[in-house]
Amino acid sequence: PEPRDAEPRATRRSRASRGPASPGTRPAGGPPPRSSERFVEPPGGTDPRARPGDAAPAPTRTGRFAGWWDVWGPHIRRFAPTVLVNHAVTVVLIVVVAVVIGIGVSFSVVPAAIGAMWMLSTLAPVGFSGQTLGVAPFLPAALIALGHAHRVRAACGSTVTVRNLRVFGALSVLVPVVLTLVAWFMLWDASSVYPVEPPNLAVAELRTVVLHGLVFVAGLGPRIWRALLIRRGLPAWPVESVRLAGSFLSWMAVAGLVVVVVRLVANLSSAGAAYGVAAGAVGATGLTVLSLLYLPTLVIGAVAVLMGGEFHIGQGVTTLFGVTNVNLPPLPVLAAVPNEDVPLGPAWLAVTAAVAIAVVYRFIRGREFLEAPVATAVGAGVVSGVVALVVSWLAGGQLGVYGHTGALVWMASAEAAGWLLVPAVVLMLFMVRQGTRVTEEIADAPAAGVAPAPGEGDDADLPAAPASAAGDADAGADGAGTDGDGDGDADADADTDADADARGDSAADVDADADADADADADSDVDAEAGSDADADAEASSDADADGGIHAVAGADVDGDAATGGGPEAEAQDGVGTPPGTAVPLSAVTDPDAVAPGDTGEAEADPDSDPDPGSDAPGPRT
């Protein structure tokens, strides 16, 4: 056998054919030689001179699934943990409660309890002992929705792409749908042993999709939705409509909560009588907890009644115009339901009217401008009606032997839309009319002796005047103390020509010419200073209009006057399909919720970067 440091014969022959290597040289493209390595790789060893780039590339995966995973895998890995953790927390809490129930009864009921509580957490109906509990406690679902919406907004972070949103939305809906299917099978399996019945699977899945779909949509927030609309080249006023509708419904919920609390305090005797069916402290605690869980359901009913609608508990009906009294379930919170006609019944509609007007007025005053005031008002009414429809449907259902319970869905939807749409449209139209008057006054201002800012007024649309005409105009303006063009150059030229003529007429008038030159220089300086002051005033007014302007274009974005080259009328005409003079005077508070999309082929919404909401459509802005 050959020694370890010996080379194969073929290797020695090849090296001999190349000749001795010159000192100081190394193979092209290779690492520098190291004396300790002796240029010989031991058998079975590794080359210490090898670099990471010299290794052979890993084999690429092939196949349809591999290609699909290469595209969607990174997005799934980013958002799947968030969705799984959200629902894992819910499942763990349900399991804990089910185990506590199993300790008191039997552990064999734990699977049925888990399935039933998951169904109730998605506001799906559940059957017990031949009766259907379709009115699920609304408080757990509301808390879950708020928590998940907050997690959605946090998971999106400062940058998110359209593909991210597609994957996130699909996971946010598919995971609870799968869990609902598992819970349905658990109830179906337990129905052969215990008096529980699984609900209609289609109804349960539909409620799950609607609930968690709304949670995802609300969790994205206005910034991301505005960025998506801008990316598609669509107007961003629907985002403002949703915000206005959300503000109105939130304040109506506060008013409904106040009504329920006041009614409970005024009817404490009935609430105390409901505890008579409780067996000891444990039973009283259970009734109290159950009352808290159903408190949002009564708040929704109170909101419907305040808007002029109806709240039903079986055959019992409560409205501002009359009450149909029936026996109610022994639940303390139901003491808030009136058993006789409401005092001053229809007069309580003023509460809803006041809330609507205050919300719309506050919404308008809180913005420097609106892109499309009337469209925003109409959209807010539509969104309010749709949200009221969905919430009333989710909060209502069959209450065992009592019958259908909850707000009358179609009436609550129509009234929520009408109560917001009418005052919003009226106030928006009023503001548009006020904006038209302001535009006309500004357009007529130059005729009253006020010099227009650079680029404004009727002169902006006219061709440039000849030099002589410009000089005449400047002379006339100079008599009024203001240069027409704001620089005083024409006056200086006229004075210089006069001086030249005077010098040509007589050489004896040197002193007079000197005096005339001095006067001309003084006049030129004065005119130049006046022109500079006029320019400064014009710039100041332009800056004031740009920084603290109160004009809003109906149906279009608001562009700076100096940038567009036109006055307020030209600004109002920038909107497509918008008549001239539709500027809306608003407050100088800007709503910083706009997000400019920036992505590489996909829309990226950066919630931290916050351009003005009015910059949705292209166009310069000063």
Image (cartoon, rainbow, N blue to C red):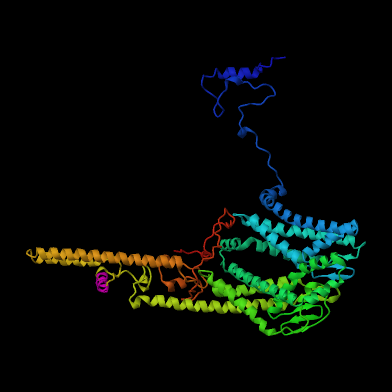
Residue located 56% across and 56% down the image: 608
Percent from the top left, x then y, of residue 29?
A: 55, 29
**For residue 374, which quarter of the picture?**
bottom right
- Of all residues, the one furthest to the right in this rendering is 193
Magenta stretch: dominant secondary structure: helix
- Of all residues, the one furthest to the left in this rendering is 508
Up the image or down, 506 lies above or below 378; here it is above
Would you say 571 lies left or right of 9 here? left
Of 456 and 93, the residue lying toward us: 93
Residue located 59% across and 75% down the image: 358
Classify the position of the N terminus by image quarter. Answer: top right
Would you say 543 lies left or right of 480 here? right
Q: Is residue 411 inside the magenta stretch?
A: no
Q: Is residue 471 inside the magenta stretch?
A: yes
User: Can you see residue 199?
Assistant: yes
Percent from the top left, x then y, of residue 465?
A: 29, 70
Total labels drawn: 0
Q: Give the range drawn in magenta.
A: 469-480
Residue located 62% across and 79% down the image: 353
Residue located 84% across and 65% down the image: 281
User: Can you see residue 200?
Assistant: no
Up the image or down, 434 lies above or below 517; here it is below
Percent from the top left, x then y, of residue 114?
A: 83, 59
Classify the position of the C terminus by image quarter. Answer: bottom left
Would you say 479 lies left or right of 550 here? left
**For residue 389, which quarter of the picture?**
bottom right
Of 47 and 326, the residue lying toward us: 326
Up the image or down, 50 lies above or below 600; here it is above
Percent from the top left, x then y, of residue 324?
A: 79, 83
